[in-house]
Amino acid sequence: KVGDTIHIKGHTTDFEQEIESMQIENEPVKEAKSGDSIGIKVKERVRPHDLVYKVIE
């Protein structure tokens, strides 16, 4: 969901960021459900096989 914080972790990747915008099939959306393929803008390089976690405080 837009506004949530995610953590992206991989072999050489490790950062957190807030989701500022999200798209499904090039259309902006506010949230997605489990299993949806989404696009988000990230502040650092993300590589294949990196994992994305939702941060719960």
Image: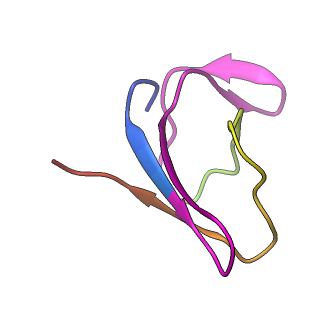
Comparing 21 with 30, the one in front is 21
Image coordinates for residue 33, horizontal then vertical, percent: 48, 46
Q: Determine whether 55 is above or below 51 in the image.
A: above
Residue lying at 76% horizontally and 20% vertically, measured from the top left? 27
Residue lying at 51% horizontally and 21% vertically, measured from the top left? 30
Comparing 41 with 44, the one in front is 44
Image coordinates for residue 28, horizontal then vertical, percent: 69, 18
Determine the image quadrant of residue 44. top right
The residue sitting at the bottom extreme is: 11
Residue lying at 51% horizontally and 31% vertically, measured from the top left? 19
The residue sitting at the front extreme is: 12
Q: Is residue 42 in the magenta section?
A: no
Residue lying at 53% horizontally and 54% vertically, measured from the top left? 15
Determine the image quadrant of residue 29. top right
Does 26 sit left or right of 21 as displayed? right
Query: Which residues, given as a range, are shown in magenta?
Result: 8-34
**Taking the image as drawn, is residue 34 in sight?**
no
**Taking the image as drawn, is residue 35 in sight?**
yes
